[in-house]
Image (tube, helix red, strand yellow):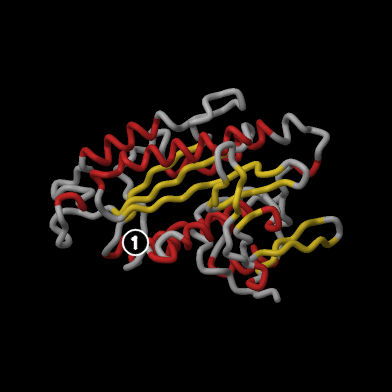
């Protein structure tokens, strides 16, 4: 059943507000809204058909006069994750795009950390293992790693030293800065022959957990010129996908990313609060 009202996690900020205020990590309450946002964004901005995305976003596609129109359809939403067969073991992956006859072509792993920042480097072994495992089986897979941390500031809440992300004078703690530097070594895999341990795109962001800026990205770190800046993450995924799949398989039209009709009911619903790109914070893929 279609619904003219936009779903709740169209914007990254809306999903991050849930992450920042979650009181429990059970059942992935803090991170599932970000999964929903990524799935929606891969359709709206990325041009991937909703039926190719797991978990399935609350979107449908109707064709009129040869043009594909996106509609909001809450009944289409499915929350289960995709299990991907890796080279060493099967792996449940947060968000996956699969193409018929090809298999998984793009995937995003999302992590969220609210405290114990001195232990961040312990997550590296898991991240390296995940990338290696999937790239052994699917060297062409465009794999992204997206990690959000709570920007807990000293003096604004009662925190243990290990849970502080930003000092009273506004400096990001050394544990997070070191983690950023280590993550840079895992980013930027471009060709299918490159190191399997690396991801095609990696992003690290701190999320403000209080006040009027609740759910917003802490802009001072990482800096805008960092390869890990979240503003570059999705563009890097799309550019790498286009290089690997539609470019190589130019005759395989199913590999091309869709361009949605600007008059799509979904975009009309979003426009009720302003132009889609202003309301969303990113540009829908229209044409």
Q: Where is residue 90 in the image (x, y as percent from the top left)?
A: 57, 46
Rendered view: 85 above or below 132 = below
Q: Which residue lies furthest to the right in this view?
A: 65
Q: Which residue lies furthest to the front in this view?
A: 88
Rendered view: 15 above or below 188 = below
Q: In which quarter of the image is residue 63?
A: bottom right
Taking the spot 36% from the left edge, 60% from the top edge, the residue there is: 215
Mark 1 secondary-structure assignment: helix
Taking the spot 40% from the left edge, 28% from the top edge, the residue there is: 185
Q: Position of residue 161 (x, y in %)?
A: 14, 51
**Quarter in which the N terminus is drawn:** bottom right
Q: Nearer the viewer, residue 158 or 79?
A: 79
- How many numbered marks are there? 1
Q: Position of residue 137 (x, y in %)?
A: 62, 35
Which residue is denoted by mark 1 in the rendering?
Answer: 20
Q: Which of 250 and 179 is in front in this view?
A: 179
């Amino acid at each position: 059943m279609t619904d003219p009202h936009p779903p709740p996690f169209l914007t990254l900020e809306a999903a991050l507000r849930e992450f920042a205020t979650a009181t429990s990590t059970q059942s992935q309450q803090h991170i599932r809204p970000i999964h929903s946002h990524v799935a929606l964004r891969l359709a709206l901005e990325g041009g991937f058909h909703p039926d190719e995305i797991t978990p399935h976003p609350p979107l449908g596609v109707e064709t009129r006069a040869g043009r594909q129109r996106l509609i909001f359809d809450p009944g289409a939403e499915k929350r289960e994750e995709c299990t991907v067969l890796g080279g060493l073991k099967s792996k449940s992956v947060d968000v996956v795009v699969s193409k018929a006859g090809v298999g998984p072509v793009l995937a995003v792993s999302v992590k969220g950390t609210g405290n114990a920042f001195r232990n961040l480097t312990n997550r590296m072994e898991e991240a390296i293992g995940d990338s290696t495992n999937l790239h052994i089986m699917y060297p062409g897979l465009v794999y992204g790693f997206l990690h959000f941390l709570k920007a807990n500031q000293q003096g604004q809440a009662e925190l243990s030293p290990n849970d502080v992300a930003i000092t009273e004078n506004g400096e990001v703690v050394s544990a997070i800065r070191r983690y950023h530097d280590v993550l840079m070594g895992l980013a930027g895999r471009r060709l299918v022959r490159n190191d399997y341990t690396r991801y095609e795109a990696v992003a690290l962001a701190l999320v403000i957990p209080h006040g009027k800026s609740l759910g917003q990205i802490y802009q001072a770190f990482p800096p805008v010129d960092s390869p890990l800046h979240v503003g570059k993450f999705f563009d890097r995924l799309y550019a790498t996908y286009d290089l690997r799949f539609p470019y190589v398989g130019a005759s395989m039209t199913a590999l091309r990313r869709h361009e949605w009709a600007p008059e799509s009911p979904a975009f009309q619903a979003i426009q009720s609060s302003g132009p889609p790109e202003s309301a969303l914070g990113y540009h829908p893929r229209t044409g």
